[in-house]
Every structure is written in C-alpha cells, then in structure tokens.
Amino acid sequence: MAETIIDLTAEQALRLAYDKRMRMHKRVELTVDQLYALTLLTLNNAVQPTDYPTLGTAIEAVTGVQNINLLVDHHTLASLPADTKLVADISIDLNIVDIPVEP
C-alpha cells in the first residue's frame, strides 16, 4: 500500500521550527563563592543589539552588579496561531568539570 507524503501547513511548520530548532546552549564558567542571578529582560522594540553595551553599563551601575554576560537574545514573532502562546522553557545545569591537562 502506498504512503502519502503530506506537506506541512504554515502553522505546523512554525510549530516544528519552534519545538525542534529554537534551542541554544551556552556554557559559562562561574566563580566560586559568588552570587548569580539569571534574569529575563523584556525590551522595547527600539532596543537594538548595538544598544547592548549601553544596557550592560546601565545594569552594572546598579550597586552590587559586577558583570553582565549576555547569553541569548531573541525577537519573538509579531503574531501566533490562534489559541496558542509562546513560552520560554529555561533550565540550568550546574556541573563541576575537570580542567583539561595538556600533555
């Protein structure tokens, strides 16, 4: 019996792209005995990547903030399919890794 290949609808293609391809992995070395906060900033559309250094300087001007490390940025879609919402599933894995020894 023959199998039929069905093209994805625009909504199915969008869901597939977001569910499977919209992923990012970054690894950052942390300092011992240091407090960290992972924060999600909502930015006005007028903010551009060229503004990030100014934004970082402004945040570092807050007493106690020592360093900003931009890991990911993303501009969300202007609209979504009906009866859907966009969510960010954020997880963090802290690991102790060996320092490679060069021969």
Image (cartoon, rainbow, N blue to C red):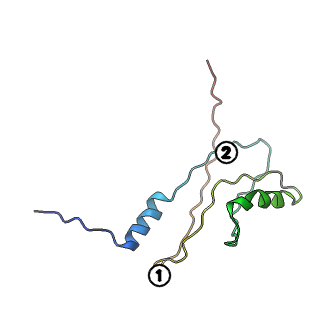
Query: Residue, x 80% and y 43% (percent of image)?
Result: 33
Q: Amino acid at mark 2?
A: Val
Q: Residues within 10 Å of mark 1 (few under 14, many from 20)?
A: few
Locate residue 21 relative to residue 89 in the image: left or right.
Answer: left
- Which quadrant would the N terminus be assigned to in this image? bottom left
Taking depth in this image into account, of 89 and 45 the one nearest to the observer is 45
Place of residue 64 in the rendered image (x, y in percent of width and height, measured from the top left): 87, 55
Place of residue 89 in the rendered image (x, y in percent of width and height, measured from the top left): 56, 63
Location of residue 28 with respect to 12 vertically, above or below: above
Q: Residues within 10 Å of mark 2 (few under 14, many from 20)?
A: few
- The circle drawn on residue 28 is 2
Query: Element type at marker 1?
Result: loop
In the image, farthest residue toward the top:
103
In the image, farthest residue toward the right:
63
Locate residue 6 relative to residue 97 in the image: left or right.
Answer: left
Query: Residue, x 67% and y 72% (percent of image)?
Result: 45
Query: Residue, x 70% and y 72% (percent of image)?
Result: 44
Place of residue 13 in the rendered image (x, y in percent of width and height, measured from the top left): 39, 67
- Which quadrant would the C terminus be assigned to in this image? top right
Query: Element type at marker 2?
Result: loop
- Identify residue for label 1: 83
In the image, farthest residue toward the bottom:
82
- The circle drawn on residue 18 is none
In the image, farthest residue toward the left:
1
Whichever of labels 2 and 1 marks the residue nearer the N terminus, that label is 2
Location of residue 63 with respect to 93 vertically, above or below: below
Locate residue 69 relative to residue 13 in the image: left or right.
Answer: right
User: Number of marks in the image?
Assistant: 2
| Residue 9 lies in quadrant | bottom left
Place of residue 18 in the rendered image (x, y in percent of width and height, measured from the top left): 47, 64
Q: Amino acid at mark 1?
A: Asp
- Cα distance in 3D space between marks 2 and 1: 37 Å
